[in-house]
Amino acid sequence: MPNKTTAIAHSNIALIKYWGNFDARLRMPLNDSLSMNLDALTTETTVEFDDALAQDEIVLGGEPADEKTSARVVEQLNRIRREAKTKSFARVHSKNNFPSATGLASSASAFAALTLAATRAAGLELSERQLSILARQGSGSAARSIPAGFVEWLAATNVTSTSDQSYARQLLPPDAWDLHDVIAIVSRDAKKVGSSEGHAVVNTSPFLGERISRLPIRYHRVRRELLNKNLKGMGAEIETEAIELHMLAMTSRPPIFYWSPATVRVMDAVRQWREEGLEAYYTLDAGPNVHVLVEGKHAAEVANRLRTFADVQEVIVSGAGGGAKLSEAHLF
């Protein structure tokens, strides 16, 4: 068994969202989704299985992980141990280069990196599809951070569907389209309600059925324009999709509110810029921070405009990112 393995994975921004599970235990989603990996946002994770350990040791950002996070990581390690037929405990060190639990899909990059590093450290060599399926069980959106570039995650919601039918695959490589995500960080605070809790209560929203019935048309429209590399063609649909996700959260029981006043100010500004001729569109994940999608030629201008907002704490500019990969530089 290899002694120590490190993997790096990118966060992703969903263009068509994942919100709610067909099978909560296996994190099989209610609908297909589309996303773009973010080159500037990474998680780096080193895993070492050691027969001398009495339990798993989980360190995140240089500090021992809290009980809730540790439990999720151990659960994923248990899946990998069963696959590798080993009982050895693991030492796991992980770090992000961006704020965690703020609506930037930190669990996606975290579980993608963990899954690749831990499977290789345990002596397994899985295909991209197998890694995506396994990563999905740790965190749904992690399935999308395994392949590179612009990605499609298949839901497999038929009653006869099995876990191996829900996986992510590449639609376009990272260099196929010079699309940029200019992220306005309006809060670095960890959100009070995690995405997992949101998935668990989405079926209490009276609007879920309406969303699911209408989504296939939007999905195929955005997918078509993505393949055509047409931001204007898919922009309005992306914004509607983002608002709809938050509408579901706000109308769940109990209601979940992720937006802040700064969130709304940035969204309003993007709409105003577009009326003035700047082709930019916003989207949001489950958090207050705003992702502004633009062609690469407009990224610097949008970033500079966002930096003038008093309540924008930081601006991150990212192009499309690669898939999960191994690294020879270890964290311990």
Image (cartoon, rainbow, N blue to C red):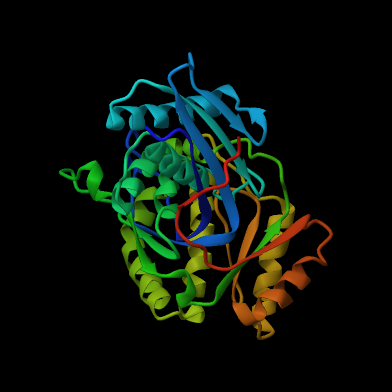
Q: Position of residue 210 (x, y in %)?
A: 36, 55
At x 53%, y 53%, the residue is 11
Q: Horizontally, is 308 left or right of 36 in the view?
A: right
At x 74%, y 56%, the residue is 262
Q: Horizontally, is 48 left or right of 192 in the view?
A: left
Q: Position of residue 78 (x, y in %)?
A: 37, 26
Instruction: Count the numbered circles shown.
Output: 0
- Residue 29 seen by the camera: no
121 vs 281, nearest the viewer: 121
In this view, which residue lies farthest toward the left? 160
Above or below — where is 281 with respect to 186? below
At x 66%, y 80%, the residue is 298
Q: For the C terminus, give its image quadrant.
A: top right
Q: Position of residue 231 (x, y in %)?
A: 50, 78
Above or below — where is 325 with respect to 125? below
34 vs 320, nearest the viewer: 320
292 vs 237, nearest the viewer: 292
Q: For the N terminus, give its image quadrant.
A: top left
Above or below — where is 15 with respect to 48? below
- Residue 215 seen by the camera: yes
At x 36%, y 64%, the residue is 170
143 vs 23, nearest the viewer: 143
In this view, which residue lies farthest toward the top? 54
Q: Horizontally, is 329 left or right of 134 in the view?
A: right
Q: Position of residue 326 (x, y in %)?
A: 47, 50
